[in-house]
Image: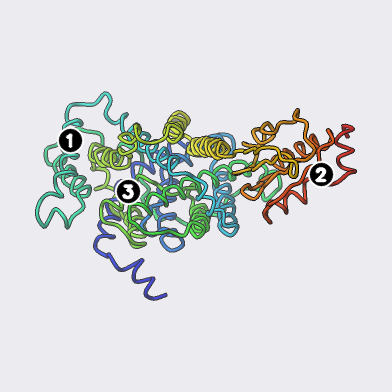
Amino acid sequence: MIQTMKKEWFSNIRGDLLAGLVVALALIPEAIAFSIIAGVDPKVGLYASFCIAVVIAFTGGRPGMISAATGAMALLMVTLVKEHGLEYLLAATLLTGVFQIAAGYLKLGNLMRFVSRSVVTGFVNALAILIFMAQVPELIDVTWHVYAMTATGLGIIYLFPLIPVIGKSLPSPLVCIVGLTIFAVFMGIDVRTVGDMGQLPDTLPIFLWPEVPLTLETLMIILPYSAGLAVVGLLESMMTATIVDDLTDTQSDKNRECKGQGIANIGAGLMGGMAGCAMIGQSIINVKSGGRGRLSTFAAGMFLLILIVFLGEWLKLIPMAALVAVMIMVSIGTFSWDSIRNLKHHPMSTNLVMVATVVVVVATHNLAIGVFVGVLLASLFFANKVGRFMVVKSSEITAETGRHYQIVGQVFFASADKFSQSFDFKEVVDKVTIDLSLAHFWDITAVSALDKVVIKFRRDGTEVDLIGLNEASATIVDKFGVHDKPEEVEKMMSGH
């Protein structure tokens, strides 16, 4: 226990603290922007980001991952806020947390194993594109100073690490933000700053219980929004955890992360904040800035609160161009460039799943829809591929055994028709032996196909002998099959 705590909290103190500061600075404009999207005061997003980051540092299952207010969640809140107001949003946030805790106890985090690598790659590429697209408005209708500062910022981010000793000791995104801010202030350059994004809060968050009637009507209002927020929040968090696992070459506890997200959202709702989830962009900033442990996530939340409440006047001076440079670095680092290079080498089905996931996520700005489409396509392609591997071999007729069929492969909904069509029912033969020792029956569709084959042969007076059925297949055939149940066969033949 103590060893685990030391490893997760205090094994990288300096790196975690510096990375947390970088993340906190990058969180501020995003939290404000997401609050505006949701139609609430900027402090709702800022308080949520502080609270979620601090709580998830203790309760989450993925050390070093950053969770806060996100755009994906904000988009789902717009209608609720517009029609019912902030108090109902806070109530929905609490219910979202309850759903996510329940998902953790139901071990729904294990469902991530059904998400293929091509879907994860598509998800990552789509988020990289969305992160870049979110920076474009900051680069339209601006003076040349903005372009010069953004280019300078990118130069600092990529070249500073090459400087001996000091380049490895300080995160280059932090050097970029501090350096460009000092330069802009001393040179008096008139560019858009963090202060232009919205009013920063000047007080600490306080405990708030949503002022909504505790009635069934209220539950019916917030239930669909909470369900949607819970699903999208967990989906983005699980996908981000998988990506951070790869970046750090470590494993995470997905079910603990589900519970942690729920507890963090309940905490945010009780502090006047909106629901949030893991952020891939900020998580990558954290990892690339040297953050690895829970301390980096905790530091990000605490630094965020300190900056907005106590150092707000200084914070307002940060030029948006510096933060745009950091986020462009994130989008470039997030995008899987290998997925482009491997298009020629990967199977067409893999490429289609990846591209479909990217297109749907970018087009809808809804991660859940994109991932659902990707998983659905991947499942269909997999079922089609496995179904093609099922073959039925027929041997010569002998006087003793009659026609012998050997079934090889998996029989399920995708291969059931092929299975049924592989038998010659027009052939006049006294006996048919169907060898199932190299086959496996998976579902009711497969059992139904076997029933049809046996009943068709027997209807023409042919004796049918099934041999080699393995135990698992025999269980499902015995339970759902009807070919050895005369009364059921009679019902089937009579159309009942």
Which badge, 1 or 2, comes first in the chain's sequence?
1
As drawn, the residue found furthest toward the bottom would be 2
The residue pinned by badge 1 equals 149
Q: What x and y, as percent, mark residue 111?
A: 54, 50
Q: Residue at x 34, y 62 (%)?
A: 295
Q: Residue at x 49, y 35 (%)?
A: 370
Within 10 angstroms of label 1, few (less than 14), some, or many (20 or more) residues?
many
Q: Amino acid at mark 3?
A: Ile
Placement of the C terminus among the 4 image quadrants: top right
Q: What x and y, as percent, mark residue 284?
A: 32, 48
Q: Quadrant of residue 339?
A: top left
Task: Estimate the spatial distance between the alpha carbons at disc 1 and disc 2, rounded to whole Å.
Answer: 75 Å
Please report contact status of discs 1 and 3: CB closer than 8 Å, yes or no: no
Q: Quadrant of residue 195?
A: top left
Mark drawn on residue 353 = none
Task: State the SS at label 3.
Answer: helix
The residue pinned by badge 2 equals 482
The residue pinned by badge 3 equals 284
- Vertical side of 148 occupied by 255: above or below: below
Of residues 226 and 118, the one nearer the viewer is: 118
